[in-house]
Image (cartoon, grey):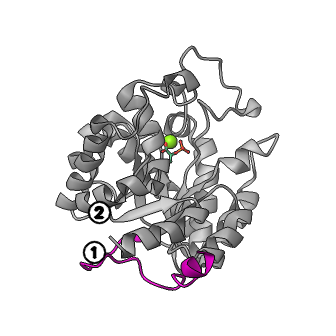
Amino acid sequence: HVRMLNALKGKKTVTHSGQAVRLYANIGRPSDMDAVLGNDAEGIGLFRSEFLYLESDDFPSEDRQFAAYREVAEKMGGKHVIVRTLDIGADKQVDYFGLQAEDNPALGYRAIRICLTEPDIFKVQLRAILRASAFGNIAIMLPMITSVQEVQDARAIIEEVKTTLNDEHVKFNKDIQVGIMIETPASVIMAEELAQVVDFFSIGTNDLTQYTLACDRQNPHLKRFADPHSPAVLRMIEMAVTAAHRHHIWCGICGELGADPSLTETFLKIGVDELSVSPGSILLLRKAITQA
Ligand code: PEP
Ligand code: MG
């Protein structure tokens, strides 16, 4: 079995009928890179940057962040590395942010909402990501987007940081791609408009399931009701992919559902362009797809 999977390393992920899917990896820290390279990931579809903040007792410096992003970008050797900006709040709490306790943290002050409210925190991370973009093929991904305005506001801050780096003669990729996570129902409903202001979509099925089905992802008593196979969730996914393709951008899945082999054919039929999964699932999925 292991030998059979090893034989798939270095192979493209293409179905019998010639449909290609990119198999990327989700990572939480640079030390995950051994597993990424060992399992032949075609890119990093989700680099959760929270570890920098969660494993620190104060805001991580620009240089510390830069070193982490650069290490991953260099190890991927020109392959795509999609860095998701800060997704603190809700299930990911950090003391030094001084966030107020909330009755409904999942519906609260988190992720892009913090970044847009406190741009000074956001800018440190953006500087680090942009500087690292000179060392590989990095893209920026914004979490928890619900409107076009949020994207425009975030893009304005990105442009401001680029201008500053330019003035400082610091190298970065001036054409860095900016995409968003599709993980709120609002982002699906607005997908047509959003697809016109970003370079790619990546569907976060963990949060999309939570918000679509109104089921707290942390609550084990809701298992029966929080079914990501629900037609409501699958239809959301299809809507996002269709809108993306109509506007000539790609759409992937980086939530856990992407690794569910019972849905692989469905995702192929819908036309999902990329599946970003934990490194250990990559070769199993490649096997499933090449046999589909
Ligand atoms: C998701 O919501 O599906 C996702 C990939 O992000 P996270 O699990 O980090 O919220
Ligand atoms: Mg999420």
Q: Quadrant of residue 25?
A: bottom right
Q: Tell which of 141 and 3 is nearer to you.
A: 3
Q: Tell which of 210 and 227 is nearer to you.
A: 227
The crowd level at tag 1 (other Cα within 10 Å; few <14, some 14-19, many 20+) is some
Q: Residue furthest right?
A: 57
Instruction: Locate residue 136, reporting x and y percent.
Output: 57, 77
Q: Is residue 89 left or right of residue 137?
A: right
Q: Which residue is mark 1?
A: 19
- Residue 154's place in the image compared with 27, above or below, is above
Cβ atoms at labels 1 and 2 below 8 Å apart: yes
Label 1's element?
loop
* Image point (44%, 31%), residue name: 210
Please tell me whether the stretch drawn in magenta is mainly helix, strand or loop.
loop
Quadrant the C terminus occupies: bottom left
Instruction: Locate residue 256, reporting x and y percent.
Output: 50, 49
Q: Residue furthest left?
A: 246
Instruction: Locate residue 89, reporting x and y percent.
Output: 60, 32
Is residue 225 visible in the rendered image? The answer is: yes
What are the residue bounds of the magenta stretch? 1-22
